[in-house]
Amino acid sequence: MLEIENIIFPESLGDALATVETDPGAVVLGGCGYLRLGSRKIATAVDLSKLGLDTITETEHSYEIGAMVSLRTLETDSCINVFASGALVRAVENIVGIQLRTCVTLGGSVAGRYPFSDPITALLAIDAQLVFQGAGRISLQDYLTGKGLRDILVKIILPKDERVAAFTSMRKSTTDYAVLNCAVARVGTDFRVVVGSRPSRAIRVEAAEKHLAANGLTRETAEQAGLLAAENLSFGDNPRGSGEYRRKICPVLVKRALIEVLDAA
Ligand SMILES: Cc1cc2nc3c(=O)[nH]c(=O)nc-3n(C[C@H](O)[C@H](O)[C@H](O)COP(=O)(O)OP(=O)(O)OC[C@H]3O[C@@H](n4cnc5c(N)ncnc54)[C@H](O)[C@@H]3O)c2cc1C
């Protein structure tokens, strides 16, 4: 059970950050999907729901997704359905069910840095940037490899470009956590190849990206990129699958995603 001793509704992002910085018992609430799992007592819950972070804004060069935007809002947004071939929508549309996706937020999904996360894998292939109230703007990649921040995630920025992308995953049943997930993208002559739920955090596979940039995307190089991903990444065991199994399916997921990008051309 989740027990909250005191809940505050800051009137500004500055107030929210001040609470997080000065109160060691303060915990920021997203949609509480993950926070409420298990038994936990929160001394000061910081509820961001009155700060207007629940909108998606299109600017000249980007889409800006407020941290409190729910996965359901994301998957039903007409622009996000088209941007990067809808890869971000593909990454969230099978997470449990509509009721959960209506509650849980993209901000909570990113801030939590969950290794099983589907949207994080897609966002890495999209070169997402994050804006924190204290730390300012940093890349998702740096956030994932860094120590973690005690901060308020304000928004997630997707650079608006002609990116063609795809998301694939292997799950034991449609709505289960992924055994392995993968997102790829082509931006001009550059490529992104990302594999997550290994079961450790999503990571870009530079060897595969360089191979594609040097040789172009064909059915053959798609297969080679998948093999490079399996060779260059570490995989581990968890109740959903063994490291050995993950290494076996990795080339298949990477190749499938790349062929989707190839066929979209
Ligand atoms: C039963 C279940 C099944 C799931 N299955 C999947 C799945 O298959 N694939 C998948 O990708 N995800 C899955 N998820 C995770 C889900 O999609 C969300 O990523 C998760 O619930 C976190 O989002 P939230 O809004 O609920 O955040 P919360 O649980 O509220 O918060 C998560 C963490 O982020 C922090 N936080 C939240 N918002 C901010 C902010 N703005 N700034 C700073 N810190 C913040 C919180 O303090 C907390 O530490 C599942 C979740 C549940 C409950």
Image (spheres, grey):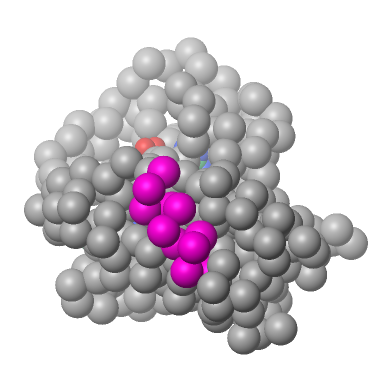
The spot of residue 77 in percent (x, y) is: 62, 77
The spot of residue 121 in percent (x, y) is: 47, 55
Q: Residue at x 64, y 59 (%)?
A: 212
Is residue 32 at least partly visible in the picture?
no
Q: Is residue 243 left or right of residue 164?
A: left
Q: Is residue 181 magenta?
A: no
Residue located farthest toward the right when viewing the structure as drawn:
60
Magenta stretch, main secondary structure, is: helix
What quarter of the picture does the N terminus occupy?
top left
Q: Which residues are magenta?
A: 222-232
- Viewer-side residue, 201 vs 218: 218
Instruction: Give the vertical position of 141 relative to 254 (above or below).
Output: above
Q: Is residue 187 left or right of residue 39?
A: right
Q: Residue at x 19, y 76 (%)?
A: 173
Q: Is residue 227 magenta?
A: yes
Based on the displayed image, in which of its 4 quarters is residue 88 positioned? bottom right
Is residue 96 at least partly visible in the picture?
yes
The spot of residue 195 in percent (x, y) is: 43, 54
